[in-house]
Amino acid sequence: MLQLMGKLRVYAYRAATDMRKSFNGLRVLVRQELGENPLSGDLFLFLNCLTDQAKLRKK
């Protein structure tokens, strides 16, 4: 369950993501591809190629 408080930014990674990646692997995508800080408190959304699976990363 996510509790939304204050100002929350949501970033969607638009390329298909390998869902076998760990959250550490997704953190690398956030830093290198999105140019954002994965520890910022923002929400990062990743989808697989069929868009039937998703992973959210919030720290």
Image: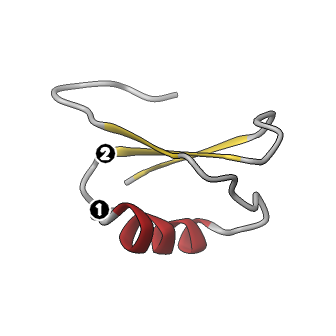
Label 1 sits on a secondary structure element that is loop
For the residue pair 54 and 35, the one nearer the viewer reads as 35
Please, which residue is most extreme toward the left here? 6
Q: In this view, does 26 lie above or below 44?
A: below
Label 2 sits on what residue type?
Asp
Q: Mark 1 points at which residue?
A: 36
User: What coloring was used for the rendering?
Assistant: secondary structure
Left or right placement of residue 37 versus residue 45 in this view: left
Left or right placement of residue 50 versus residue 46 in this view: right
Please, which residue is most extreme toward the front here? 15
Q: Distance between the residues labelled 2 and 1?
A: 9 Å
Give percent across and percent down for residue 26. 55, 65
Q: Residues within 10 Å of mark 1 (few under 14, many from 20)?
A: some
Q: How crowded is mark 2: few (under 14 residues within 10 Å), some or many (20 or more)?
A: some
Q: Which residue corresponds to the image point at 17% horizontal and 29% vertical from the top-left?
A: 7
**Disc 2, disc 1: CB below 8 Å?**
yes
For the residue pair 24 and 33, the one nearer the viewer reads as 33
Dot label at residue 3: none
Q: Which residue corresponds to the image point at 16% horizontal and 26% vertical from the top-left?
A: 6
Residue 37, quarter of the rendered image: bottom left
Q: Is residue 25 above or below residue 11?
A: below
Label 1 sits on what residue type?
Glu
Q: Which residue corresponds to the image point at 55% horizontal and 73% vertical from the top-left?
A: 24
Q: Which residue corresponds to the image point at 38% horizontal and 60% vertical from the top-left?
A: 34
Give percent across and percent down for residue 11. 39, 42
Q: Mark 2 points at which residue?
A: 42
